[in-house]
C-alpha cells in the first residue's frame, strides 16, 4: 500500500492565514508562510548552531557517532513533520516547534541544567523551556528593530507548552513574557506542538538504544530482555542471525520506531473521532491531549525508559563526566557572579553589583548559552587549570 498524503488540511490544524501574528508586526514573506519563516529563523539562529556542541547523553568529545542536541533536534523534526503530514496538520509548524524544543538546554545536558538550577535557586533557578523562550524573545540579537527572533504566537506557544498546560508558580521568563503577550498557559497547545512533543519521545528512546549499544553500555543480549524493545531485538536475531552491529541497530530501530508511530497515529485518530474538533481552538480547549500513545504503549515506553535509565543514563561512564560537569557549571557561576569583570564586556554591561540578582541573571544566561567545549575553555581561562570530564 502506498501512502497518499491528505489533500486538504484538517479543520483542527493550525492555519498560517489564521495565525495570531507576531509581537512586533512585520510584513510577511511573499514566498513562505509565517511558520516556514519561523523555522528558517530558528535554523539560522546562533542558539540553534550551538546545539552542535551540547550534550545529549554523552559529552560531545566522547565520539563523533553519538547524538548531540543538534542531531537529536533534527531527528525529532523529521518525525514530527512525518506525523503532521499523515494527520493533515501544518507540517511546517510541527517541524518548527521540534527544531526549537531544546534551544534552552545548558552545556552538559541535564547535569548542567541541574547544576545551574541549584546555583541560581536564590534568583528563581533555571528551566530550559523558560530559557528557550528568553532566547527567542530577548537574547538573540539578529535584527535591528527588535530583540529575539519575533516568532509567531503559535510557535512561542508550542515552545513553552508542548508538554501540556502550565500552572503556577511559573518560571520568571515565562511569567514575564505572558504578561506582555499571553500564551494561554492554562490550555493545551495546538496539535502540531502536541505531535512535536511525542516525536521527541520516539526519537530519543530509539537513538539512545543506538548510542547505548555502540558505546557498549549494554549488549544485544541485554536489550533482548528489555521491555518493549526486546521483542524487536529478538525478532531481528531470529530473522537474520548474528548481524554486524550497525545493521542490527538499523533493523531494530526501524521496526521499533514504526510500531511507536503506528500506535500514536491509531490512538490520536481514535481521540479525534471521539472529540471531533472543528478548529484548533477546540483542540486547545480539550481537557486532555488530543495526540498520544495508547495506554499499553505508554506503559511500555515508561518501562523501556526505566531500562535505559538504569543501564545507560546512570552508567558510570555517563555519570562520572556529568558529576564533573556539574562542578564546572557551579564553579563558573560562583566565579563570574562574584567578579562580573570576568565576563565579556557586552555581558558585563548588563550586570549590577557582584553577587546581586541582576548579576546572577546575566551570568545564568551566559552559562546557559555555552557549548560543552566553551564551558571547559572558560573554566580553564578563569581558574588557570583544566578539568578532564572523562576518566583517564
Image: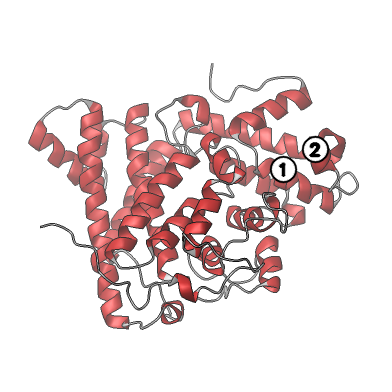
Task: From this view, report whether residue 372 is shown above or below residue 27.
Answer: above
Task: From this view, report whether residue 43 is shown above or below residue 318.
Answer: below
Q: Quadrant of the C terminus?
A: top right
Looking at the image, residue 311 sits to the left or right of residue 230; the answer is right
Task: From this view, report whether residue 300 is shown above or below residue 326.
Answer: below
Foreground pick, 221 / 285: 285
Give the residue furthest to the front. Answer: 30
Circle 1 SS class: helix
Where is residue 25, by image quadrant?
A: bottom right
Color encoding of the figure = secondary structure
Residue 119 placement (x, y as % from top left):
72, 45
Residue 12 placement (x, y as % from top left):
37, 77
Q: Is residue 301 visible?
A: yes
Residue depicted at x 78% and y 27% = 382
The answer to which of marks 2 and 1 sits earlier in the sequence is 2
Q: Name the residue under label 2.
A: 336
Circle 2 SS class: helix
Where is residue 377, by image quadrant?
A: top right
Mark 2 nearby-residue class (10 Å; few <14, some 14–19, many ≥20): many
Task: From this view, report whether residue 254 is shown above or below residue 298.
Answer: above
Residue depicted at x 54% and y 23% = 390
Residue 315 placement (x, y as % from top left):
44, 33
Residue depicted at x 42% and y 82% = 282
**Between marks 2 and 1, how big is the CA–CA gap?**
10 Å
Foreground pick, 97 / 307: 97
Q: Name the residue under label 1.
A: 366
Q: Quadrant of the N terminus?
A: bottom left
Q: Can residue 302 be seen in this view?
A: no
Foreground pick, 308 / 195: 195
Check residue 296 in the rendering and tell me which mark sits there, or answer none: none
**Number of numbered discs visible in the structure rendering:** 2
Amino acid at each position: 500500500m502506498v501512502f497518499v498524503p491528505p489533500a486538504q488540511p484538517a479543520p483542527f490544524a493550525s492555519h498560517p492565514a489564521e495565525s495570531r501574528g507576531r509581537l512586533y508586526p512585520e510584513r510577511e514573506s511573499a514566498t513562505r508562510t509565517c511558520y516556514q519563516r519561523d523555522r528558517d529563523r530558528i535554523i539560522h539562529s546562533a542558539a540553534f548552531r550551538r546545539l552542535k556542541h551540547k550534550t545529549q547523553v554523552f559529552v560531545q568529545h566522547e565520539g563523533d557517532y553519538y547524538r548531540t542536541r543538534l542531531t537529536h533536534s533534527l531527528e525529532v523534526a523529521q518525525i514530527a513533520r512525518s506525523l503532521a503530514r499523515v494527520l493533515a496538520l501544518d507540517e511546517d509548524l510541527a517541524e518548527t516547534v521540534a527544531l526549537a524544543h531544546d534551544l534552552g538546554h545548558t552545556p552538559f545536558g541535564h547535569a548542567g541544567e541541574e547544576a545551574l538550577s541549584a546555583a541560581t535557586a536564590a534568583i528563581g533557578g533555571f528551566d530550559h523551556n523558560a530559557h528557550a523562550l528568553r532566547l527567542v524573545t530577548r537574547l538573540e540579537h539578529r535584527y535591528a528593530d527588535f530583540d529575539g527572533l519575533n516568532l509567531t504566537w503559535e510557535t512561542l506557544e508550542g515552545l513553552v507548552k508542548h508538554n501540556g498546560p502550565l500552572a503556577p508558580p511559573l518560571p520568571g521568563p515565562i511569567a514575564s513574557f505572558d504578561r506582555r503577550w499571553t500564551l494561554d498557559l492554562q490550555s493545551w497547545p495546538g496539535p502540531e506542538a502536541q505531535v512535536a512533543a511525542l516525536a521527541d519521545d520516539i526519537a530519543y528512546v530509539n537513538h539512545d538504544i543506538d548510542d547505548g549499544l555502540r558505546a557498549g553500555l549494554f549488549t544485544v543480549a541485554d536489550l533482548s530482555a528489555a521491555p518493549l524493545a526486546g521483542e524487536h531485538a529478538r525478532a531481528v536475531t531470529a530473522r537474520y542471525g548474528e548481524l554486524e552491529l550497525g545493521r542490527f541497530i538499523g533493523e531494530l530501530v526501524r521496526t521499533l520506531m514504526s510500531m511507536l508511530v503506528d500506535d500514536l497515529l491509531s490512538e490520536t485518530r481514535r481521540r479525534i473521532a471521539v472529540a471531533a474538533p472543528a478548529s484548533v481552538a477546540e483542540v486547545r480547549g480539550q481537557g486532555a491531549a488530543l495526540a498520544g500513545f495508547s495506554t499499553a504503549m505508554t506503559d511500555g515506553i515508561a518501562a523501556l525508559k526505566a531500562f535505559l535509565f538504569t543501564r545507560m543514563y546512570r552508567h558510570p561512564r555517563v555519570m562520572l563526566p556529568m558529576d564533573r560537569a556539574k562542578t564546572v557549571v557551579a564553579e563558573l557561576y560562583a566565579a563570574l557572579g562574584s567578579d562580573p569583570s570576568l565576563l565579556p564586556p557586552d555581558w558585563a554591561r548588563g550586570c549590577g553589583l557582584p553577587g546581586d540578582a541582576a548579576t546572577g541573571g546575566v551570568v545564568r544566561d551566559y552559562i546557559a548559552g555555552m557549548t560543552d567545549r566553551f564551558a571547559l575553555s572558560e573554566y580553564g581561562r578563569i581558574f588557570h587549570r583544566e578539568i578532564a570530564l572523562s576518566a583517564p
